[in-house]
Amino acid sequence: VPGDHDPTDRAYAEALDAADPLASFRDEFVIADDDVCYLDGNSLGRLPKATEEALRRVVSEEWGTGLVRGWSRWIDRPAQVGDRLGRAVLGAGPGQVLVADSTTVNLYRLAAAALDARPDRGAIVADPADFPTDRYVLQGLAAERGRRLRRLRAVRTDAVARACAPGDVALVCLSHVDFRTAALAPLAEITAAAHAAGALVLWDLSHSAGVVPVSLDAAGVDLAAGCTYKYLFSGPGAPAWVYVRAEQQRRLRAPVWGWFAQRDQFAMGGAFRRADGVTGWLTGTPSVLGLAAVDEGIGLVERAGVEAIRAKSVALTELVIALFDAWLAPLGFELMTTRLAAGRGSHVAVRHPEAWRLCRVLAEQDAVIADFRPPDVVRLGFSPLTTRFAEAWTGAERLRRACAERRYERVESVRPRVT
Amino acid sequence: VPGDHDPTDRAYAEALDAADPLASFRDEFVIADDDVCYLDGNSLGRLPKATEEALRRVVSEEWGTGLVRGWSRWIDRPAQVGDRLGRAVLGAGPGQVLVADSTTVNLYRLAAAALDARPDRGAIVADPADFPTDRYVLQGLAAERGRRLRRLRAVRTDAVARACAPGDVALVCLSHVDFRTAALAPLAEITAAAHAAGALVLWDLSHSAGVVPVSLDAAGVDLAAGCTYKYLFSGPGAPAWVYVRAEQQRRLRAPVWGWFAQRDQFAMGGAFRRADGVTGWLTGTPSVLGLAAVDEGIGLVERAGVEAIRAKSVALTELVIALFDAWLAPLGFELMTTRLAAGRGSHVAVRHPEAWRLCRVLAEQDAVIADFRPPDVVRLGFSPLTTRFAEAWTGAERLRRACAERRYERVESVRPRVT
């Protein structure tokens, strides 16, 4: 890659692709149309080819042929796949991660457990700009259990320390990467600040797991959860995960007492006796198909390595920020994502008053799938195992053209229910 | 079918198969080995051929090709598939059923909602012989919310009326069909008795949905939940369902406030505003693959009709009870399932001190998959769309032989963790 380069020259992006050590991973995914710029892997990651085969196997062979006997293997999958996720992605030693349920249900049950563990503390520190489900879950729990939500001004260590200073905070619950701006929170520092004030910490890693290196054990995190359908390529509505730090597993009380959390489950005993370890944090029957897909998705990330994925992620966002400066800033776009590589995740958010209609033009006329977020944000997401530099370049270039040529003026401005 | 018949003659079972109007449905399922007697469809239903194709389509086409754009259709699937389940299986009008989450999580959130709606009532009526997850969920909620569990002596209307008489019952939570004995509860009568005492009612229909006609609307049921992997053929860990009666949808408060329950979800507004109708009872991102499988499973039941399925179910259990009398009773087996067809679901439970080892012999030597339930129960389950009369006959005959020949004596008695 030339040192003296012009990012607006497509040849530069192509040179980055030619030098990309992860380039061959794209061949391991289903790419139905190579001309589509898919810049929404931060909403839904692409389909790995191995997942098609794994799902066929679990459906036709394990279920179709093995029938109920499959449970002798399936029963351990939430913890097995969780251990693999912990090792490859989360910086978590074995016996602390489960793949199960949805992110929403997991946030609910972990936050509820944290509140129960701090009955004398009335406050929950949350980010008013956090992803909706995180905010709603906390609002619901706060209403139900008579706690106050304390809104954080910014996801920064000093702000968390200040918010926790009164000594009344039970739980700090935040996202590692902001779904809108891509701001990357200082996870270890904030965790330490919350702990110093006696609060428990719950992190949502939906927008970082698989694309940003994470060290939950080393950072002393109590609880974490996240989805698997973004940078872990596990498919729409695939099971989510929970991390419950080993030392918190018995201290905290899991609110949903389900049969998969029962010690000696198939004795079907009368009283609930929670299983030791992370198993005690299971709930009901896990999705066997979903687990097969999650396992394959993690496998790809494991093979590539999160450090290498992160390096490409940084390079992709750097390229697009350079193109923002050259192309988009002059057209009135505003950059919402930090220029500091260490402070951002794997997407770049730009604002424009016509964001919604521009996304429509991109999708309908330009084969660019980007993501609109209200009120005026376009998210350009980069999934390093599948996004090419030239693809990111093309996406930015088409966004420039759609805006410069004012093609959005010919698109209806009414938004559908799903965006 | 001859009127004057000998049930111990295999020709009789074969005549029943020849006259079975549902016989052809078996061809619509994957039957890897026609010689296996699969008498455990009440744990995990067989794989429909259409489901293999539906899953291939949703994975390779909808996810692989459509990518994130699939959400414009997927978003409505929990309610659409729920409506179909309501119409075909549950006797529920539209807008009251969702396919989402697990049975355990659904029992938790429905029971929690019921308790919140009766804050001045301290008791929960439950069945101490109910399926483990039902009992554990209620134990957990009772402990968390300072309520008492009142154990029902029998799942009978008079017993429920007596248990509710003190006027302090918030919730009656029971299973429609007992997972062990197959006893079928008088759902409408018990619901009326509970209502007369001011309690809310939550039914678990895991062992009846798809095999016993149900009329949730007509019976006045408040809340119900159940799995889809038994008589609805949706696969291991497929999403479960909830029924929330229309008039209770706004009265009750859903405990888990997730983004799929938010009015105008993709506006991503600051405060949780619960969507009208049953949508307000969604939680997080639903399993798109799971929903595809559930839809196919329901489709088969819809086409066959629950009344026809029930008729065959009764005939299957009658045959096996006749074989019990002829073969098993003399060997010391005890019948746990009622002889009254109207009082049982679709399996027959027999007790024998060697139940565990007999199940092992059947599975390992006789290609009969039946289900052991501690301490001494063999469940013989019949799934009318896939179980042949001759298959049921063979299962009973092999059980007789395994016992009569005392082959269980050569099998280890140590039970593995999963049974």
Image: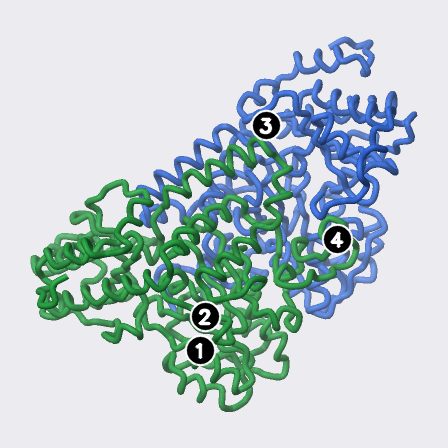
Chain colours: A blue, B green
Report which residue position mark 4 lands on: A194
Residue type of the residue flagged with mark 2:
Ser
For the residues carrying marks 4 and 2, which lies nearer the camera in this image?
Answer: 2
Per the model, the C-alpha gap separating discs 4 and 2 is 52 Å
Spatial CA distance of label 4 from label 3 is 30 Å
Q: Is residue A245 visible?
A: no
- Work out whether A389 lies above or below B132: above
- The number of numbered discs placed on residues in the rendered structure image is 4
Q: Residue at x 73, y 48 (%)?
A: B266
Question: Alpha carbon of mark 2 to alpha carbon of mark 3: how far?
Answer: 54 Å
Which residue, given by chain and number where applicable, does mark 2 sit on? B215
Tag 2 and tag 1, C-beta contact below 8 Å: yes
Are the residues under marks 4 and 2 on the same chain? no
- Residue B144, percent from left and from top: 58, 71
As measured in the structure, the alpha-carbon distance from the residue carrying label 2 to the one carrying label 1 is 8 Å
Point out the frontmost of discs 2 and 1.
2
- Identified by mark 1, the residue type is Ala
Image coordinates of residue B127 in percent, x first then y, are: 41, 76
Q: Is residue B10 left or right of residue B281?
A: left
Residue wearing tag 3: A305
Residue B349 lies, with reference to residue A407, above or below; the image says below
Q: Is residue B249 shown left or right of residue B51?
A: right
Q: Label 1, on which residue?
A: B188
Q: Residues within 10 Å of mark 4 (few under 14, many from 20)?
A: many
| Image coords of residue A416 (percent x, y) | 73, 45
Q: Chain of mark 1?
A: B
The residue drawn where x is 60% and y is 50% is B76
Specify which label sits upstream in the sequence, 4 or 3.
4
CA gap between label 3 and label 1 equals 58 Å
Say what amino acid the circle numbered 3 marks.
Answer: Gly
User: Disc 1 or disc 4, which is closer to the eye?
Assistant: 1
